[in-house]
């Protein structure tokens, strides 16, 4: 039990003596002598202890309903209304909640809990942002919850002494302390809080402001830039957030913005965008995406036309585009803007592709596309460019159609950099005596020119609420352990304005408190001897907020409904806004374009990563998720283009050497410099350095230790994310980098990831042999031996099958009944027969599938060193290929998720000597862990290389710092845990075990594993459908983890024999092909050819020729085939049916599905 | 009396270095066996040895103190073997991850070593069985040691598949034991065929080797018994033990020789059994490596999926096996007194010719692989071979080519194949080259397979290296023990190819020299 004294497990106050009851100073001293520092931490927690505590708490809660128990004493409602009141052991319950996103915004989640412990997170189908989908951050948040390196108790550092304290100690202390500021109106009091869109927190903020008008309230997000908000302020008059409707957009232009991934609204936008890119018939049309960017992002990889430009040149591009559009497109009030834009001179104008800009402008101004396009500007762009983009959207008629705006709260709109700079100045002036830091880590990630660490130390009293041990928390006078979002009450507004409640899935594991509870305590005025009564209660606070908003009448019912649905107020409050062209013109007149970075003066770009502002650095799933473009794990080297690397002598090692290393280099910006390794990223702008933010933590958990480099010291209090005039020079030393995929090219094996242009698809999609006469057809449909091939579809004619002999066995293989068109009544003609289809047009390469699979299937992480050896364990990986002839200027970046193809004719099955991998009656290639002895022959014979071997006891053990030779490591101290030999890792602690999915075997060492199509879910669905009296498992009733998470809906999965299923339809498509199908493995996973929609006026002759013959032989070339007038580019007609199946599977959505 | 005290006699003689050679044919050659005159039959035993001398010399290898080199060499190999055993224990306790394998290259040095050792294990049975059936008399000088080498190589070979599995404690799943949950092994898997093929081969080879040794073991037993009877007191097994070495010999060789009494009936049975075993072993020589090659040939991987593999692997195995025989016997010939009388330059030359033939066969296979890859028109297939020659492991490929294809071409030159030094050098290179051949087939095919997204590299760890050198240590240690304690020549067979065995002297007086046998050997 964690507490030294004072409060029992149930929160009831106990006392052992009158002194204790009176809480005298002598008694506290006595307590601290008796229980030395650390005694109160729940260090040796075991599951037994945990369960005992839970049990005891429940009993007491029932008896006395005392608030503050370990088990939440407020009833939270299961998501389903059909689930019996009692928990059925072995059956998970789903609860809706929400997860705030760093920088504002939120995701709606549905959390799977097993006997009270959350194990897996899914998107809430009722939440408009998620619609059942989820991001890597929400998928990974369970790992944070059970992170053994979390802060576990309150720590007080008075003078030089560090003492373990309790929440009660803090409460008692804080009342007295904060009362002292009442007289001065809060003079000297400052709050540095993370940006959050929580109505309850806003309400408490208002209470604090009311109590102390002079106190500073600084919302801070280390990764943001003020330009978007400033741009909106210029163009719209007030801070507004853009809400896009990609489903209507025909042309999308992104100016250095990764709009499809990583933003608070990205989940929805990626889904909507993908729906406009998915072609089914030759009559369908597609949207077209133009991307101009400095790095290589998920959005850029989707672009039909992509230019790589440094951020300053992107601004010039925006201006040039604006000139072109405004010259031809006049709307009321835009005249002044046209003049102002025309007056902007571009010193580096020649570096822009004029033709590209002209054709882009023409495409945007096409009468079909007016009001149906979207232009977005990214955070690297100055406010003026953002304002200009708003104006262009206005001029093109997009505002109110595809682009709408909604006001954002003051906290989210705040300028982080200016705020912390101001705070810093006040600290310097001695004007801050108490600083409360909530959910933020400014000592680590404040702009480097502020030297915030020193300033923080100089503040007399600092209070820090933190989930993990971090740089700020370790220096604070009071460090308070926070409750995770899955442990606390709250509320959060999503990017589109939808507000969701946050409800705890589990009692705080370490008695942490939430931000609203801490702020409420501070805001509450009370006498010091009343401290026992002042018990902030998150549930009460959230309810109070909503009681005020929803009204007292029927509140309980509405509140329960909100908890059940996970949505309090759905729907967006976004609307069209009036663009103030004159203000934009005025701003445009201030624009001074520059010629762009040169050889002597590079441009640095701070890019967001999955690590956020550093808070996710201790999450091993995120650490081991390959980063987009480079596929690097566990690190964040500075990235430059191959040409720039060559020029500066910074080319990294080839991966064919044993430990590929990057050169160490010094990046300098305006006199500040950091040293970090350099790696190349083909496809990014030349003379530009990408600095991925979020790693390089120094005070952190074991996972984050010594991983990566901190780039925040180079940031400036001006807040810009792109800074010119930077230097990069090579210094002595090299640094090893681990990547899951170092090979860039597809090696001309275009049959692997098939791509075709829309024009070619329109021409041949209906009749793939249309270009051949009878004799040609005869030749193609018969192989060299005159045997008939299976009729090939369009996609198959694009690949090897058209060129290789038919794969006909001369034997009838008696062991393989699993053939296509199985005879009626035979084993493989019985439903269900599982299959999957992955749409390469939709996949944006974000990697959610990888983390969702990792979470669902208990897949271990292996660490940087083992990844370097090629031993990563992910069951579904996303292969990344660069397309084009040269690495310096690739024409595209494409992604292909690869997982077990569940071959009907599986090469792995025949070679296993012990029958450990066998074929199941439902067409699955099943892996029998208990039978596996680990010969690894199956993995060798797998053409897709999707099998993963447990070279060590990955799953059972965790990283631990204690090992022989630790002290011999250079530098001493805690070292990177990834270097620890596996043998000396420690067994998993009880808390870490709690995150495991109980329905999936934890694999021991020496065992092969691979994707099972989530067989545990299939089995659960089979049981459930029988219980519900369904003859077959309906489509959508079961989803694989990757499919469920995929924001772009690229993965479809289901019963192939179900004629109405989406997977059946996708596989029947002319675009569907089998990966390496010529091997006759007959995969149950098929891919849909990636379709591009390039602007016909922007493609070269060679590419145009492929439209007349995409099949790789013969030549031709006549004029393009027309644009097509189709309308069905949004294919969600069958979604309702699928959602119904899905709803059944969760038994949560009644008739009220508003999908 | 030397007849009754053979120990003493040979000891004296050996102390002087060697038993004085008898008169031999003077041909002006380094070695009379190299006679190139079609009218003369090359002698298979030089220096006009008598039966008795042959017995004394060969028994002397086990009965006398070994040369000064033996203990340091044995100490070294035993240490290497010990390190290897420690590495294996470390591997078993920690996990296969202590090797450099990964998810792209799931087999590397483990299976390379397995195929390497299995290949070496081919020469012994080939020499004993196939050359026996073909009545090649020269085999008699090398068959015993080659068979021993086979046994030890197969032991080393069997080690690797056993320890390469992830869970060695369940390795019994590969045996068709009907009691385990009614789950049978997968009879479609070539790995299972390996289990059967290798274990059969080992069993038959062991029987063949042991059975051939029985008369010679009986000879050692009898000599020990004779000494015990006639010269009590010396020597002892160890200075402080009162047990005499000959007592141990009497018992151990006595048990091992299973009651052999040199009777005609025994010899009759022995000859028949020997012939039957030779007949049984002959197809095994061809089948084992064919089946090992099917581990690869039945896979879908470019570079593995090739129909040429079975004959190519068998040729390679004979190639590598003969190289290893030469590699072991040429130094032994120098180190053991009088061994040159039995293993003549003619023997070396014959084996060198086999190396030349099989090396050229292997070279032909390498060429055909490239041709077929090109001819197939399959880009994956062609890439696999281009990648071998020019990819990251080009050095392994070119090591293989220069050692296996180029170096045996030296044997077109007569001086080279008749010169023990050159033959040893080539044998050494071929042994290295054959290891690399397996490395090239396994690692370079695996590391860049179908999907470029999953290409990787393999790098050996110290454990990889020490496990392999450990297996070499085990092999050499076993071989040294064999040389020390067992009859390293098939004495009876060797005597049968001596001129003295042919009392009618079919016109071979010149080659066989004067009539020494009757004069020297007391009846």
Image (cartoon, helix red, strand yellow):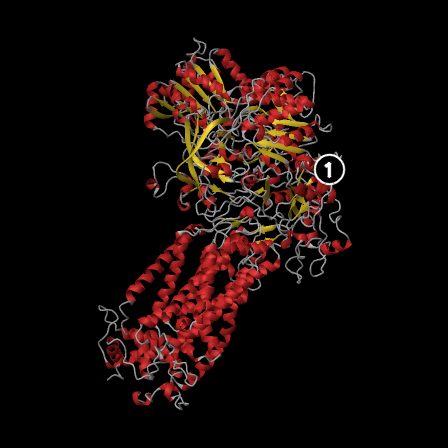
User: Which chain does tag 1 point to?
Assistant: A
In the picture, measured across the screen, residue A374 lies left or right of residue A150, that is right
User: Which is more toward the observer, B26 or A655?
Assistant: B26
Asked if residue A610 shows in the view, the reply is yes
User: Which is more toward the observer, B11 or B361?
Assistant: B361
In the picture, measured across the screen, residue A332 lies left or right of residue B164, that is right
* Furthest residue in direction top, as rendered: A183
Count of residue discs? 1
Answer above or below: position of A834 versus B331: above
Residue A814: percent from the left, percent from the top?
65, 61
Residue A619: percent from the left, percent from the top?
48, 35
Residue A434, quarter of the rendered image: top left
Residue B260, quarter of the rendered image: bottom left
Residue A31: percent from the left, percent from the top?
34, 25
Residue at the image point whose x is 48% and y is 60% from the top = B438
Residue at the image point whose x is 49% and y is 59% from the top = B172
Q: Quadrant of the C terminus of chain B?
A: bottom left
Asked if residue B259 shows in the view, the reply is no
Answer above or below: position of B366 versus B125: above
Residue A1071, quarter of the rendered image: top right
Residue A816: percent from the left, percent from the top?
64, 57
The residue singled out by tag 1 in the image is A284
């Amino acid at each position: 039990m964690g507490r030294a004294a004072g409060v029992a497990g149930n929160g009831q106050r106990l006392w052992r003596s009158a002194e204790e009851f009176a809480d005298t100073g002598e008694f506290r001293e006595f307590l601290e002598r008796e229980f030395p520092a650390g005694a109160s931490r729940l260090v040796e927690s075991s599951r037994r202890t945990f369960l005992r505590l839970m049990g005891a708490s429940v009993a007491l809660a029932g008896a006395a309903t005392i608030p503050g128990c370990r088990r939440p004493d407020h009833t939270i409602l299961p998501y389903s209304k059909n689930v019996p009141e009692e928990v059925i052991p072995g059956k998970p319950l789903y609860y809706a909640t929400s997860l705030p996103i760093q920088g504002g915004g939120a995701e709606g989640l549905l959390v799977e809990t097993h006997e009270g412990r959350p194990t897996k997170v899914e998107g809430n189908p009722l939440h408009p942002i998620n619609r059942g989908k989820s991001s890597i951050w929400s998928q990974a948040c369970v790992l944070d919850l059970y992170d053994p390196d979390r802060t576990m108790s309150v720590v007080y550092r008075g003078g030089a002494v560090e003492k373990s304290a309790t929440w009660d100690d803090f409460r008692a202390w804080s009342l007295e302390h904060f009362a002292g500021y009442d007289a001065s109106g809060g003079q000297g009091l400052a709050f540095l809080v993370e940006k959050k869109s929580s109505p309850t927190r806003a309400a408490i903020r208002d209470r604090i402001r009311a109590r102390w008008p002079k106190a500073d309230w600084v919302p801070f997000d280390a990764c943001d830039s003020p330009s978007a908000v400033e741009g909106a302020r210029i163009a719209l008059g007030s801070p507004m957030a853009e809400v896009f409707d990609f489903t209507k957009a025909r042309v999308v232009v992104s100016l250095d913005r990764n709009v499809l991934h990583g933003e608070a609204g990205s989940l929805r936008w990626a889904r909507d965008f993908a729906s406009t890119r998915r072609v089914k018939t030759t009559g369908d049309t597609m949207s077209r995406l133009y991307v101009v960017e400095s790095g290589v992002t998920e959005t850029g990889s989707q672009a039909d036309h992509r230019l790589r430009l440094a951020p300053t040149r992107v601004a010039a591009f925006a201006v040039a585009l604006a000139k072109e559009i405004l010259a031809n497109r006049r709307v009321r009030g835009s005249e002044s803007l046209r003049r102002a834009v025309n007056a902007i001179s571009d010193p580096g104008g020649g570096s822009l592709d004029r033709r590209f800009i002209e054709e882009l402008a023409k495409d945007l101004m096409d009468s079909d596309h007016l009001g149906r396009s979207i232009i977005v500007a990214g955070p690297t762009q100055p406010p003026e460019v953002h304002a200009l983009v708003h104006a262009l959207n206005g001029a093109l008629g997009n505002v109110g159609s595809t682009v709408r705006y909604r006001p954002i709260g003051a906290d989210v709109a705040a300028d982080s950099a200016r705020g912390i700079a101001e705070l810093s100045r006040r600290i310097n002036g001695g004007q801050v005596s108490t600083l409360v830091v909530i959910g933020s880590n400014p000592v680590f990630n404040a702009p480097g020119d502020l030297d915030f660490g020193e300033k923080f130390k100089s503040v007399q009293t600092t209070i820090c609420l933190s989930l993990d041990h971090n740089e700020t928390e370790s220096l604070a006078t009071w460090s308070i352990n926070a409750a995770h979002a899955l442990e606390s009450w709250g509320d959060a507004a999503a990017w589109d304005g939808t507000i969701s409640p946050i409800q705890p899935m589990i009692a705080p594991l370490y008695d942490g408190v939430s931000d609203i509870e801490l702020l409420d305590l501070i805001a509450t005025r009370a006498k010091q001897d009343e401290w026992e009564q002042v018990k902030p209660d998150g549930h009460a606070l959230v309810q109070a907020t909503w009681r005020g908003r929803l009204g007292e009448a029927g509140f309980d019912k509405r509140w329960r409904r909100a908890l059940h649905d996970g949505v309090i107020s759905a729907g967006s409050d976004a609307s069209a806004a009036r663009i103030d062209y004159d203000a934009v013109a005025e701003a445009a007149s201030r624009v001074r374009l520059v010629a762009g970075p040169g050889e002597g003066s590079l441009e640095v770009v701070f890019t967001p990563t999955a690590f956020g502002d550093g808070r996710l650095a201790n999450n091993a799933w995120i650490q081991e998720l390959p980063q987009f473009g480079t596929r690097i794990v566990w690190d964040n080297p500075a990235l430059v283009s191959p040409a720039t690397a060559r020029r500066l002598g910074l080319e990294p090692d080839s991966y064919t050497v044993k430990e590929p290393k990057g050169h160490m280099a010094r990046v300098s910006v305006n006199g500040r410099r950091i040293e970090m390794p350099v790696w190349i990223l083909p496809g990014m702008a030349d003379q530009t350095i990408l600095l991925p933010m979020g790693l390089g933590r120094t005070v952190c958990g074991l996972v984050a230790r010594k991983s990566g480099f901190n780039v925040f010291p180079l940031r400036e209090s001006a807040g810009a994310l792109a800074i010119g005039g930077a230097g990069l020079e090579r210094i002595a030393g090299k640094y090893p980098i681990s990547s899951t995929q170092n090979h860039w090219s597809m090696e001309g094996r275009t049959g692997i990831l098939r791509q075709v242009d829309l024009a070619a698809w329109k021409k041949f999609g209906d009749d793939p042999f249309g270009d051949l006469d009878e004799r040609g057809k005869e030749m193609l449909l018969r192989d060299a031996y005159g045997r008939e091939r299976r009729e090939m579809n369009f996609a198959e004619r694009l690949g090897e099958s058209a060129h290789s002999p038919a794969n006909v066995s001369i034997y009838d293989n008696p062991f393989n009944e699993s053939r296509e068109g199985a005879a009626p009544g035979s084993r493989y003609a019985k439903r269900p027969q599982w299959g999957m289809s992955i749409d390469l047009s939709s996949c944006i390469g974000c990697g959610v599938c990888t983390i969702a699979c990792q979470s669902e299937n208990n897949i271990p992480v292996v660490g940087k060193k083992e990844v370097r050896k090629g031993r990563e364990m992910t069951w579904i990986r996303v292969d990344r290929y660069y397309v084009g002839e040269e690495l310096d200027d690739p024409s595209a970046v494409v992604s292909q998720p690869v997982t077990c193809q569940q071959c009907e004719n599986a090469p792995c099955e025949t070679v296993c000597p012990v029958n450990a991998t066998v074929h199941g009656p439902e067409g699955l290639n099943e892996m029998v862990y208990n039978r596996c002895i680990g010969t690894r022959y199956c993995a060798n014979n797998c053409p897709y290389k999707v099998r993963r071997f447990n070279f060590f006891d990955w799953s059972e053990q965790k990283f631990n710092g204690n090992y022989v030779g630790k002290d011999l490591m250079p530098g001493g101290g805690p070292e990177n845990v990834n270097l620890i030999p596996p043998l000396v890792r420690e067994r998993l602690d009880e808390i870490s075990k709690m995150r495991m999915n109980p329905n999936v075997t934890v694999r021991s060492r020496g065992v092969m594993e691979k994707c099972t199509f989530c067989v545990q879910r299939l089995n659960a669905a089979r049981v459930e459908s029988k219980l519900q009296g369904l003859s077959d498992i309906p489509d959508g009733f079961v989803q694989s983890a990757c499919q469920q998470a995929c924001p772009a809906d690229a993965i479809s999965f289901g019963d192939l024999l179900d004629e109405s299923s989406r997977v059946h339809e996708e596989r029947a498509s002319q675009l569907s092909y089998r990966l390496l199908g010529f091997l006759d493995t007959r995969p149950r996973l098929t891919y849909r050819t990636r379709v591009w929609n390039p602007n016909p006026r922007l493609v070269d002759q060679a590419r145009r020729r492929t439209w007349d013959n995409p099949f790789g032989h013969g030549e031709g070339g006549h004029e393009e085939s027309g644009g097509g007038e189709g309308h069905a580019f949004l294919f969600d007609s069958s979604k309702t049916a699928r959602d119904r199946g899905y709803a059944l599977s969760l038994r949560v959505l009644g008739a009220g599905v508003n999908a | 009396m030397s007849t009754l005290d053979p120990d003493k006699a040979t000891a004296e003689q050996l102390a002087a270095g060697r038993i004085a050679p008898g008169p031999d044919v003077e041909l002006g050659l380094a070695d009379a066996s190299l006679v190139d005159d079609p009218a003369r039959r090359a002698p298979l035993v030089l220096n006009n040895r008598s039966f008795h001398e042959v017995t004394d010399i060969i028994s002397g290898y086990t009965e006398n103190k070994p040369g000064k080199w033996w203990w340091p060499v044995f100490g070294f190999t035993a240490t290497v073997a010990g390190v290897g055993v420690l590495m294996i224990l470390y591997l078993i306790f920690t996990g296969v991850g202590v090797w450099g394998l990964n998810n792209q290259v799931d087999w590397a040095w483990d299976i390379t070593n397995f195929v390497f050792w299995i290949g070496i294990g081919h020469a012994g049975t080939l020499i004993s069985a196939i050359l026996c059936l073909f009545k090649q008399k020269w085999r008699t000088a090398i068959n015993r040691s080659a068979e021993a080498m086979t046994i030890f190589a197969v032991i080393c070979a069997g080690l690797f598949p056993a320890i390469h599995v992830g869970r060695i404690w369940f390795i019994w799943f590969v045996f068709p034991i009907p009691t385990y949950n009614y789950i049978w092994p997968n009879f479609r898997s070539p790995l299972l065929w390996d289990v059967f093929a290798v274990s059969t081969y080992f069993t038959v080879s062991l029987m063949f080797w042991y059975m051939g040794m029985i008369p010679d073991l009986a000879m050692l037993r009898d000599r020990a018994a004779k000494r015990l009877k006639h010269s009590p007191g010396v020597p002892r097994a160890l200075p402080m033990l009162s047990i005499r070495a000959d007592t141990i010999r009497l018992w151990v060789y006595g048990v091992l020789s299973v009651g052999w009494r040199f009777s005609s009936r025994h010899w009759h049975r022995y000859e028949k059994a020997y012939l039957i075993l030779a007949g049984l072993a002959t197809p095994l020589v061809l089948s084992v490596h064919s089946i090992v090659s099917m581990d690869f040939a039945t896979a879908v991987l470019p570079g593995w999926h090739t129909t040429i593999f079975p004959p190519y692997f068998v040729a390679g195995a004979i190639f590598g096996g003969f190289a290893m025989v030469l590699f072991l016997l040429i130094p032994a010939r120098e180190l053991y007194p009088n061994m040159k009388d039995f293993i003549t330059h003619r023997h070396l030359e014959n084996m060198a010719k086999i190396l030349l033939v099989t090396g050229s066969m292997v070279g032909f296979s390498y060429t055909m692989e490239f041709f077929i890859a090109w001819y197939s028109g399959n880009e994956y297939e062609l890439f696999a071979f281009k990648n071998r020659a020019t990819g990251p492991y080009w050095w392994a490929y070119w090591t293989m080519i220069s050692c296996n294809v180029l170096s045996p071409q030296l044997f077109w030159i007569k001086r080279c194949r008749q010169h023990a030094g050159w033959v040893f050098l080539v044998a050494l290179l071929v042994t290295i080259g054959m290891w690399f051949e397996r490395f090239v087939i396994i690692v370079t095919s695996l590391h860049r397979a179908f999907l470029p997204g999953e290409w990787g590299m393999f790098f050996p760890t110290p454990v990889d290296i020490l496990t392999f050198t450990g297996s070499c240590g085990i092999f050499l240690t076993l071989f040294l023990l064999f040389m020390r304690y067992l009859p390293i020549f098939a004495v009876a067979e060797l005597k049968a190819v001596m001129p003295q065995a042919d009392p009618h002297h079919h016109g071979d007086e010149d080659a066989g020299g004067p009539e020494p046998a009757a004069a020297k050997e007391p009846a």
